[in-house]
Image (spheres, rainbow, N blue to C red):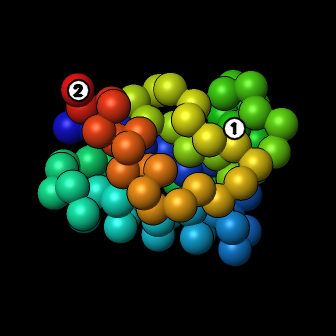
Amino acid sequence: MLNIKVLGPGCANCRKLEEIAREAVSQLGVEAAIEKVTATEAILAYDILKTPGLVINEKLVSSGRIPAVGSVVEWIRDATA
């Protein structure tokens, strides 16, 4: 099972990124736990400068932007390969 984390304080962009992650998981039909990480210390542990951030299986794949669903699908495919 995949472990996906959305890093951010809970802003609109963070919520949008969570929706995109859920859509990508749904498109691929994979099992994933999607977690929102809002604690500043926990976010900084991933060494990102801007939120929102996206972590798949403990690997930071995006930060400071909202990626397209297609990009997230590819990152999930890479993580499950």
Q: Quadrant of residue 12?
A: bottom right
Above or below, 45 against 9 in this view is above
Please report the residue visible at 24 percent of the width from the left and 63 percent of the height from the top.
27
SS label for mark 1: helix
Residue 34 shows in this picture: no
Contact between marks 1 and 2 (CB within 8 A): the answer is no
Q: Count residues near mark 1 (Cα–Cα under 10 Å), then give few for <14, some for 14-19, many for 20+.
A: many
- Where residue 20 appears, x then y in whole percent? 47, 65
Q: Nearer the viewer, residue 2 or 45?
A: 2
Please report the residue visible at 47 percent of the width from the left and 69 percent of the height from the top.
19
- Where residue 14 appears, x then y in whole percent? 64, 63
- Where residue 73 appears, x then y in whole percent? 36, 51
- Residue with the mark numbered 2: 81
Q: Quadrant of the C terminus?
A: top left
SS label for mark 2: loop
How many numbered tags mark residues here? 2
CA distance for labels 1 and 2: 26 Å
Left or right: residue 31 compared with residue 36 = left
Between tags 1 and 2, which lies in front? Answer: 2
